[in-house]
Image (cartoon, helix red, strand yellow):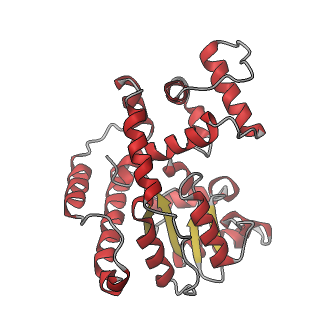
């Protein structure tokens, strides 16, 4: 996918990973003492991201200006709250329920107003200037997890689980079946296996990766154009969320819902070990290629 060497990126990534303390939430009684450690971890995450973007030879300013030409297309996942001065990149299947509840508690906006809505009330030139100013001055946060765990979560919840009978999900399952079985009509109880799902995504044209449910983070949140102030990870969701909320001065009763972190992440890791065994080495290599930039940008192995 890339034709440039990544020795420098790999060195930064390896040093960062080796120097990070074990990513577990601080105890409540040590919360105040943990700000420096958390800040250092955030700086490492941002440095890895910036180094990777630099090796892509992408001008942050030029890329942002191109995205600003079509905000409805590029910024529809960037949720906006003018009251608290926060922009949050919403990624489907990433702490969806917990961060959705947190965002609604923080903003009082159940409709999830996106950054592109700025264009609805102003002429184009003023709207572009307003968007640029907000992206420069607001606190910007993104929440990610290992791309493979996100994909597995999507598969189990939206593809394998046939109780999800929305039109969108039916269409996806039909497209996968059509691709794999050459236009044979699927039976009412036909299911899509995990290896079949991975093959569907990784073989043929790249348009299959365009669905928001498994689109790469880079294409949703544009981390090489938007300079995120907080990079939260599902693996450290509790601490990252608490410190983000305290940083922006959110009311103390606004918190991540209990049970939102910890056990579910461990369960997903255990499941990945099981589901990884179902894939061939060729399929695993195809997944690594499909999500190569996300793996590099957010320091996942």
Measured as percent of width and height from the top left, residue 114 is found at 68, 65
Nearest to the observer: residue 69 or residue 259: 259
Q: Is residue 267 left or right of residue 48?
A: right
Q: Which of the 4 quarters of the picture holds residue 89?
A: bottom right
Q: Is residue 222 above or below residue 128?
A: above
Measured as percent of width and height from the top left, residue 259 is found at 51, 65
| Residue shown at the point (61%, 46%) measured from the top left | 212
Res. 221 visible in picture? yes
Q: Is residue 183 above or below residue 222?
A: above
Res. 131 visible in picture? no
Q: Which of the 4 quarters of the picture holds residue 27?
A: bottom left
Q: Is residue 199 left or right of residue 168?
A: left
Q: Is residue 212 above or below residue 259?
A: above
Q: Quadrant of the N terminus?
A: top left
Q: Is residue 10 left or right of residue 177?
A: left
| Residue shown at the point (26%, 45%) measured from the top left | 6
Q: Residue furthest right?
A: 121
Measured as percent of width and height from the top left, residue 271 is found at 43, 41
Nearest to the observer: residue 274 or residue 142: 274
Nearest to the observer: residue 297 or residue 255: 255
Total numbered labels placed on residues in the image: 0
Measured as percent of width and height from the top left, residue 242 is found at 46, 77
Q: Which of the 4 quarters of the picture holds residue 190?
A: top right
């Amino acid at each position: 996918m890339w034709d440039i060497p990544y020795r420098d990126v790999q060195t930064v990534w390896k040093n960062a990973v080796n120097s990070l303390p074990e990513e577990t939430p601080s105890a409540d009684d040590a919360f105040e003492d943990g700000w420096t450690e958390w800040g250092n971890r955030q700086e490492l995450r941002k440095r890895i991201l910036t180094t990777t973007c630099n090796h892509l030879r992408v001008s942050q300013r030029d890329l942002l200006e191109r995205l600003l030409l079509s905000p409805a297309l590029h910024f529809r996942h960037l949720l906006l709250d003018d009251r608290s001065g926060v922009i949050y990149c919403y990624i489907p299947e990433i702490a969806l329920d917990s961060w959705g509840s947190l965002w609604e508690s923080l903003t009082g906006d159940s409709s999830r107003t996106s950054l592109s809505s700025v264009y609805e009330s102003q002429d184009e030139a003023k709207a572009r200037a307003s968007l640029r100013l907000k992206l420069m001055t607001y606190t910007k946060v993104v929440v990610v997890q290992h791309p493979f765990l996100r994909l597995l979560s999507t598969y189990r919840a939206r593809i394998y689980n046939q109780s999800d009978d929305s039109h969108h999900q039916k269409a996806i399952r039909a497209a996968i079946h059509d691709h794999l079985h050459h236009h044979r009509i699927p039976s009412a109880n036909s299911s899509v296996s995990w290896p079949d799902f991975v093959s569907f995504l990784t073989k043929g044209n790249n348009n299959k990766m365009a669905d928001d449910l498994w689109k790469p983070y880079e294409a949703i949140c544009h981390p090489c154009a938007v300079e995120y102030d907080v990079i939260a990870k599902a693996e450290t969701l509790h601490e990252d969320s608490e410190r983000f909320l305290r940083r922006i001065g959110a009311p103390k009763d606004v918190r991540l819902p209990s049970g939102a972190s910890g056990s579910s992440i461990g369960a997903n890791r255990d499941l990945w070990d099981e589901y990884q065994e179902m894939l061939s080495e060729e399929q695993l290599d195809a997944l690594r290629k499909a999500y190569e930039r996300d793996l590099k940008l957010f320091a996942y192995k």
